[in-house]
């Protein structure tokens, strides 16, 4: 599969930046307790791997458990990952959670397999008028042993709908 032209990638980046800034600038909405909710969506967008299907479970306002899986095949760089994260909320606002996370994953890429460990901080923003829709932002580090041991920065975002 051929890579998109540079101008198309720049346009896509500008679109995502505009969407992100628009979402952040929406007015706050008051939410009731966020514990006991289940979310379904995509995660790890823009982390260098394909977007992944993910589920979040918030058993309380203090913590979130997340599982994700992603797959890319039919290219010279096949990829598969299955992982989980634990998020511990530091601050819970009416429409935003700030958290630390720890996670791990089993991964394969181009025939090599290994694991990834990750840690960092993030935030999940709930939009005005759509209190069940969450945008999450993660930043941290990932230690992987898929093809060789490497420490990489991790920056990604995700979209989840909570029931």
Image: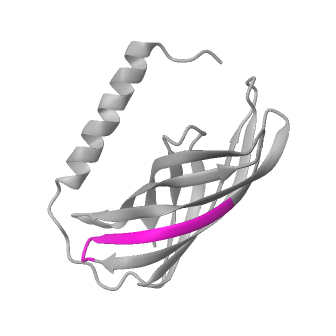
> Which residue is found at the position 49% from the left and 61% from the top?
120
Q: Which secondary structure is most common in the magenta stretch?
A: strand
Q: Please check the rendered image and state whether residue 94 is part of the magenta-colored stretch, yes or no.
A: yes
Camera-side residue of 61 and 99: 99
x and y, in percent, of residue 128 in the image: 21, 64
Query: In the rendered view, does 67 fall on the left or right side of 132?
Result: right
Query: In the rendered view, does 72 fall on the left or right side of 56?
Result: right
x and y, in percent, of residue 104 in the image: 67, 62
Q: In which quarter of the image is residue 126?
A: bottom left
**Range drawn in magenta:** 93-104
Examine the rendered structure and indicate whether residue 99 appears above or below residue 42.
Answer: below
Examine the rendered structure and indicate whether residue 136 appears above or below residue 109.
Answer: below
> Which residue is found at the position 48% from the left and 40% from the top?
46
Examine the rendered structure and indicate whether residue 122 appears above or below residue 147.
Answer: below
> Which residue is found at the position 51% from the left and 48% from the top?
154
Q: Please check the rendered image and state whether residue 76 is part of the magenta-colored stretch, yes or no.
A: no
User: What is the number of callouts on the image?
Assistant: 0
x and y, in percent, of residue 51 in the image: 56, 44
Q: In which quarter of the image is residue 50?
A: top right
Camera-side residue of 144 and 124: 144
**Which residue is farthest left?**
27
Query: In the rendered view, does 123 fall on the left or right side of 127?
Result: right
């Amino acid at each position: 599969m051929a890579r998109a032209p540079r101008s198309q990638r720049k346009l896509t980046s500008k679109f995502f930046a505009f969407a992100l800034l628009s979402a952040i600038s929406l007015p706050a909405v008051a939410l009731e307790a966020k514990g006991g909710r289940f979310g379904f969506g995509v995660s790890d967008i823009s982390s260098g791997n394909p977007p992944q299907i993910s589920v979040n479970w918030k058993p309380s306002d203090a913590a979130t458990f997340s599982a994700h899986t992603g797959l890319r095949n039919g290219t010279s760089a096949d990829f598969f990952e299955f992982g989980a994260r634990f998020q511990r909320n530091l601050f819970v606002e009416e429409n935003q959670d700030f958290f630390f996370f720890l996670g791990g994953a089993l991964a394969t890429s181009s025939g090599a397999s290994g694991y990834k460990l990750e840690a960092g901080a993030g935030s999940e923003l709930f939009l005005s008028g759509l209190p069940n829709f969450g945008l999450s932002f993660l930043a941290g580090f990932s230690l992987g042993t898929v093809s060789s041991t490497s420490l990489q920065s991790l920056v990604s975002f995700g979209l989840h709908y909570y029931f």
